[in-house]
Amino acid sequence: MNNNDAFDVCIDDAFDFLSHEYAELFKHSDATAFQHPIWLSSLYGKLAPAMAAKPLVVVVRRRATGELAAILPLVRLRRGPMRTVEFADLRVSDYLAPVCTVRTFADLLQDQSACAKLRQLVRPFDLLRMPKLLDARMPIESLLAAPRRVATNTNSYATVLTAPFEQWRTNALNPSYRKELAKKWRQVQKKGALTFSCCEDNTSILEAMETMKKYRGPRFQAQGDGDLLQRPEYFDFYSDVALRGLGSLVRLYVMKIDGNVIATVLGLSHRDSFLILMTAFDIAGYKSQSIGALTFEQVAKDCIERGDHILDFTIGDEPYKKLFGAQPSPMSSVTQAGSAAGSIAIFALNQAPWIKQAVKKMVDFRAQPIRTSTDTR
């Protein structure tokens, strides 16, 4: 067998992301937490139907054995008049990647017939959108014969964790900020019986999710951009992932005073990293105590105690991330036109600002979901 007939490619829109073969593929792949079996199962099963997104799951198998070699989790979605093909994201996934190893991806690129078949199967579309690409180890643009990726105007941020916690704190936070947070921590402790823990059962998860929704609503409404968690389909998705991922994929932290939740952090645990998805704080009650920053400190402490090496604040250039020693990683995107309408849209995006904004609104060209914004006050 030569490199031109090593793989078979097909579309399987009913693919079972909870199957054993996918679990094994993901386990040994170079994919991210946002391609985890639970995450994609819930995204395709709950969020996609609610958003009128149709599955487009590209399945790659080794021709000689039939073994699952790669998955490209995509969706077809109408954005205004535009027919788009994009990653299974729907504004909830921060990092997008094919599900395979870097080696398998390189081998797939050498199989010209498989690549040609894949490119045929994902059509038709007006626009193909691949935002939120973290690195170029698996050049999706080469697989799709798309234009070269371009840098986006946002970064992701992560801080390296080192044990013990106090050593990390000394290395990551500057002396004045450490002193300020220590003072704030003493202030909070005086307000009542303070606890910080990770949810361990369904009841505590549902309580934390409802509290998160309550705190986030007014804050994001005041900023004028709304909050995805206020929409039933998104609340259902995040709650489903939290419940099903308890003890494996998901951690949901809560800080309480006298038994009342004052802060929550929802995130994903993946390969010695903890990725922060969503936060909520009782800003009205604890505005002067920097409750968000204190919560992130406690999250870092728990992660270190669990043996994690990375605390990933994910996408967004909020200044507070650097206060915790987080360093930026550039993000990139791939866009391809599949019709004259798509070409016009891409051209317009590069023109005058008012045209660019109008086209962005029409096709919802957002590089990151609005839920990534957090507040550490």
Image (cartoon, rainbow, N blue to C red):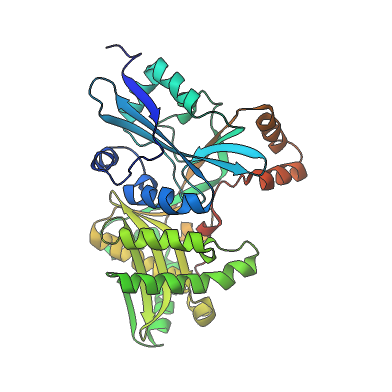
**Horizontal relation, residue 97 to residue 360: left or right:** left
Q: Is residue 377 left or right of residue 179?
A: right
The residue furthest top is 2
Residue 344 at x, y percent in the picture: 71, 31
Q: Is residue 335 visible?
A: yes
Q: Quadrant of residue 80?
A: top right
Q: Looking at the rendering, which quadrant does residue 82 occupy?
A: top right
Q: Position of residue 295 (x, y in %)?
A: 40, 70
Q: For the point 59% across and 47% down, which residue is it?
A: 366
Above or below: residue 85 compared with residue 282: above
Q: Please identify the quarter of the rendering in which residue 107 is found.
A: top left
The vertical placement of 308 against 284, above or below, is above
Identify the residue at image location x=42%, y=83%.
187
Q: Quadrant of the N terminus?
A: top left
Relative to residue 104, is residue 356 drawn left or right? right
Q: Residue at x 58, y 73 (%)?
A: 218
Is residue 315 at least partly visible in the picture?
no
- The answer to whether residue 307 is above or below residue 196 is above
- Residue at the limit of the structure toward the front, as seen here: 14
Number of residue marks: 0
User: In terms of depth relative to the viewer, which is nearer, 47 or 348?
Assistant: 47
Q: Toward the viewer: 255 or 130?
A: 130
Q: Residue at x 25, y 38 (%)?
A: 21
Asked whether 209 or 163 is in front, the reply is: 209
Q: Residue 145's x, y, as percent? A: 51, 23
